[in-house]
Amino acid sequence: MFAALIRYASPPSVLARRLSTQSLLFASGEGTFLAGSAVFFTMVVGLSLAEVGIGLTIAAVASFCVAVPAGKLVDHFGPKRMWSLSAIIQGALFLVWPFIDSFPEYVALAVVMEVAGTLGGAAHGAYVIDVLPPSERVESRAYMYSALNVGFSLGAFLGAGAIAFGTDVLRWTPVLTAALYLVNSAAILRLPDATHDVRGDEPRAKPEGIPAIRNKSWIAVTFFTGVMWTNQVLLHTVIPVWLVTETDAPKVLVAVLFATNTVMCIVLPRVASRGIRDVSTALRAVRFSTVFFVLTCLITLATHETVGWVTIVMFFLGHIVLTWAELFLSASGWTFEAELMDPRRRGDYQGVSELGGTLGRFWAPAVYGFLAMHWGAYGWLTIAAIVTSAAVGLHYAAHAGRRFLEAHVPPDVLADARVDRPAPEASALAGPASMLEPEAPLPESTGDLTR
C-alpha cells in the first residue's frame, strides 16, 4: 500500500514534473500577493473597498476585451514565448505595487497586469496541450492541478505571515511575488519547445482553419462550462455567507471548510481524472459533477433547519461533495480542450474560451447571493436547476463541437491531436477509480488550470 501511495504521489513523467514545478512557482507567487491583497490595497495603497472593487471590475473588462487578440498573438509568436513574456511582464509590474498610492495608478496597474495575465493564460493552455503527449495529458494535468493548489497554500501562508508583521512588511510583499514570477519565467524558457514554438526560416504564416470565434459550438462549450464553474461562487462566497447568517454553525468553521477543500484538491485530482479519455467519458464526468453540485445545494439548504453538531457535519458533507463537483469538472475541461479545439489554432481557441467562460460565470455572485439569501429553499433549488440546465446544454454543445472539427479539420491533423484509446477492458469504469490502483491505465485530456 505504501509503495502504491508513493507511485501515486510521483509525477507521471519528467515533463509532468517540470510543468508541475512551474505550476508550484506560479501559484506560490500569486498566492503570496492574493492572500494579503485586500489588506494591501486598503492599508498600504489607501483605497476604500469600493475603489478596490471598481478597479478589479475595470481590469476584468479589459481582460475580456483582449482575450481573443491575446490568443491570436499566441498562435503567431508561439505559446512558450508568450507565456514567458507574460511572466516577465507581470513580475516587473509587481515591483511597482509598493510605490502605488492613488486610485488612478491602482486602476492603470491592475488593467496592465490583467492584460498580461490574459496573454499568459492563453499561452499556458495552448502550450500544455501542444507539448504533452496525448497519452499523458489527463494524468499530467491532474498532477499539475495538485501542484497548483500546494503553491497557493504556500503563498497564502507567506501572505498571512506578511499581514501578521504589519503594513511595513506587507508593503514589500510584492517584491517576493516578483522574484517568484521572474524565476518562473526562466523555468518556462527551459521547458522544451512545443510544436507551435518551432520556427523555420520562412515567416510564420497565418494559422490554417476557421477562426475560433466562428465556431459557435466552442463558444457554447466554454459558456456552459463557465456556468458550471460557478460552483466556486458557492464555495468562496455563498456558502460562507449562508453559514454565518443563516445557521448556528460556528464562524471558524468557514476556515476549516476551506482547508478541507484545499487538501482534497491537492490529493484527489488524479483520482477524479481516471477513465476520462474522450468527449463521451468527459461528459460522464460532467454528469458526476452535476449530481454532486445538486447534492451540495440540497445539503446546504437543509442546514437552515438543523442545529448543533448536525449542522457542522452537514456543512462538512456539503463541502466534500462540492469539491468532488470541482474535481470532476476540472478533469472534463482538460479533455474538452484537447478534443474540441482545432489543433492548428490553439491560442485562438484559448482566447475565445476566456470570452465564453467569463460570460458563463460573471453574473453568478450577485444572482446566487440573491437566490440563496432571499428565496431560501426555492433559491437553492433554482441554483441547482441553473447548473443542471448548463450540463444539458454542454452535452449538446460538445457533440456539436466534435462534428464541427470533423467537418472542417483534415482527418490526419485531428487524429494526431486525439487521445489514445485504452483497451476496452481498461475503459469499463463506472466511476472514480481507487487511488491505490496506480498501475491501472490512465486516460487523456487537458484543461484552470492555470499558469
Image: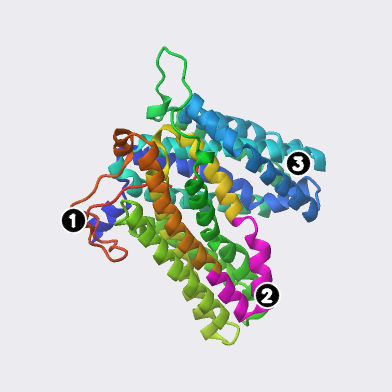
Residue named by callout 3: 107
Q: Give me the residue at 63% from left, 43% from top.
A: 64
Mark 1 touching mark 3, by CB under 8 A?
A: no
Residue 65, quarter of picture: top right
Disc 1 to disc 3, how far (Cα)?
55 Å
Colour theme = rainbow
* 36 or 166, nearer to the observer: 36
Instruction: Name the disc covering residue 362, or none.
Output: none
Residue 242, quarter of picture: bottom right
> In the rendering, at what x and y percent does residue 378 appear?
61, 79
Task: Give the residue at the far top of this rendering.
Answer: 201
Q: Give me the residue at 47% from left, 44% from top.
A: 24
Judge whether residue 364 is colored magenta.
yes
Q: Amino acid at mark 2?
A: Met
Q: Earlier in the sequence, mark 3 or mark 2?
A: 3
Q: Amino acid at mark 3?
A: Val
- Report the magenta residues as a range: 361-385
* 317 or 230, nearer to the observer: 230
Judge whether residue 331 is colored magenta.
no
SS for tag 2?
helix
Can you say whether 42 is above or below 410 in the image? below
SS for tag 3?
helix
The main secondary structure of the magenta stretch is helix
Left or right: 94, with 253 as reference point: right
Q: Earlier in the sequence, mark 1 or mark 3?
A: 3
Q: Amino acid at mark 1?
A: Pro
Residue named by callout 2: 373
Q: Earlier in the sequence, mark 2 or mark 1?
A: 2
Instruction: Name the disc covering residue 424, or none.
Output: 1
SS for tag 1?
helix
Q: Give me the residue at 51% from left, 78% from top.
A: 299
